[in-house]
């Protein structure tokens, strides 16, 4: 921790007091959001509105475990969602929610500061966004049941990966029909959570381990996100300058999940041990085939603009990660969020899922 001298001078003291007020407001935000104390919405309205759901996703991603679980408002536990409502993982609830259940499950995981709503969009064929979500479109083309999960993206990726293994094991045991295989589809951070879960399931010998056969990562920062790395390095420099201590405190409020994105951490030992030798990721478990989809704003894959700007948030090298064992697809003319809705992404997923082997 950085300590401010007891007599830093009136100017610095004034800045420190101002930052202290800001930090107090920021720390109070999760409780304000959870209780509706801001007065911007009546009790319960937050859960029902799309804007409210966006606020929930942001609060979870920004504050992580500092957000206390309060029912469905700010859920810290990973959950299965249908029509944006929680589905209990017991046989009766699952049978009622999915009367046409199939043996192949396609599980969708959103990214940072998001909820499962991020997968749904308006039907705008003229913008290359047909249908309302990838899941329903895939189910119409191949025999499968799409499932959407919500999780607290502010927690460590490894913690969410562990929780995903537990959820999948419970789901497999209570699913209305026998589960034949599971496909995990993650956008951005969701891809890291899916990869972490696949490794942890294999290590634990979990029930779902042999059922996870395919894993799709859309715009996932496997080698880290440049923006978060820049913030982490800036914080490290500022920590050495006592006048910058208030700013360091503000930057330190970044959630564990955001910090994991700096290097693309999947496993607990990567963020807990601080050992550079632990950075290398192992190959995917036997029987798991991976697809990494990267995008660039530029329609030229090899241009300098593509390499620098990428999809606005993730550069193509990190999203493709050539050192890992995976199939790869590059899509030009798309931004980071187009990867959750654009027709070209759906067609890529569908073609890959239809491939044998």
Image (cartoon, helix red, strand yellow):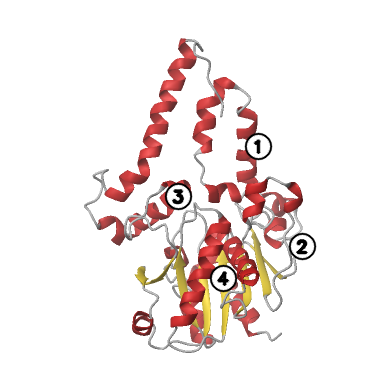
144 displayed left or right of 305: left
- Please provide percent x and percent y for residue 98: 39, 83
The answer to which of marks 3 and 2 sits earlier in the sequence is 3
Viewport quadrant of the C terminus: bottom right
User: Which quarter of the figure has residue 84?
Assistant: bottom left
Disc assigned to residue 65:
3
92 displayed left or right of 277: left
- Please provide percent x and percent y for residue 326: 72, 70
Which numbered disc, 3 or 2, marks the residue closer to the eye? 3
Residue tagged by mark 4? Answer: 185
Which numbered disc, 4 or 3, marks the residue closer to the eye? 3
Give the class, few, some or many, for how many residues have Cα within 10 Å of label 1's Cα (few <14, many ≥20): few
SS class, disc 1: helix
SS class, disc 4: strand
Residue tagged by mark 1? Answer: 233
Residue 27 appearing in the image: yes
């Amino acid at each position: 921790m950085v300590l401010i001298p007891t007599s830093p001078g009136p100017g610095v003291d004034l800045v420190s007091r101002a930052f202290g007020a800001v930090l107090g407001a920021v720390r109070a935000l999760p409780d304000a959001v959870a209780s509706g104390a801001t007065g911007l919405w009546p009790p319960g309205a937050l859960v029902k509105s799309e804007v409210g759901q966006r606020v929930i996703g942001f609060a979870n991603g920004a504050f992580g475990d500092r957000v206390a679980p309060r029912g469905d408002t700010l859920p810290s536990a990973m959950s299965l969602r249908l029509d944006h409502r929680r589905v209990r993982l017991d046989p009766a609830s699952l049978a009622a929610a999915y009367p046409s259940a199939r043996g192949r499950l396609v599980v969708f995981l959103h990214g940072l500061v998001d909820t499962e709503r991020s997968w749904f969009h308006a039907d705008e064929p003229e913008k290359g966004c047909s249908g309302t979500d990838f899941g329903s479109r895939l189910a119409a083309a191949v025999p499968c049941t799409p499932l959407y999960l919500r999780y607290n993206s502010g927690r460590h990726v490894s913690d969410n990966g562990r929780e995903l293994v537990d959820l999948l094991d419970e789901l497999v045991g209570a699913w209305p029909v026998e589960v034949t295989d599971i496909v995990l589809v993650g956008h951005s951070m969701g891809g890291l959570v899916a990869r972490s879960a696949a490794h942890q399931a294999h290590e634990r010998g979990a029930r779902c381990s042999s059922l996870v056969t395919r894993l799709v990562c859309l715009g996932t920062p496997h080698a880290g996100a440049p923006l978060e790395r820049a913030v982490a390095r800036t914080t490290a420099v500022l920590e050495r300058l006592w006048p910058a201590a208030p700013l360091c405190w503000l930057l330190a409020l970044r959630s564990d999940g955001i910090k994991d994105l700096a290097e693309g951490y999947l496993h607990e030992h990567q963020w807990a041990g601080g050992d550079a030798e632990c950075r290398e990721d192992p190959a995917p478990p036997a029987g798991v085939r991976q697809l990494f989809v990267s995008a660039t704003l530029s329609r030229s894959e090899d241009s300098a603009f593509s390499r620098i700007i990428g999809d606005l948030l993730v550069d193509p090298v990190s999203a493709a990660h050539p050192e890992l064992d995976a199939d790869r697809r590059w899509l030009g003319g798309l931004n980071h969020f187009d990867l959750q809705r654009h027709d070209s992404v759906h067609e890529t997923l569908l073609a890959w899922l239809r491939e044998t082997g």
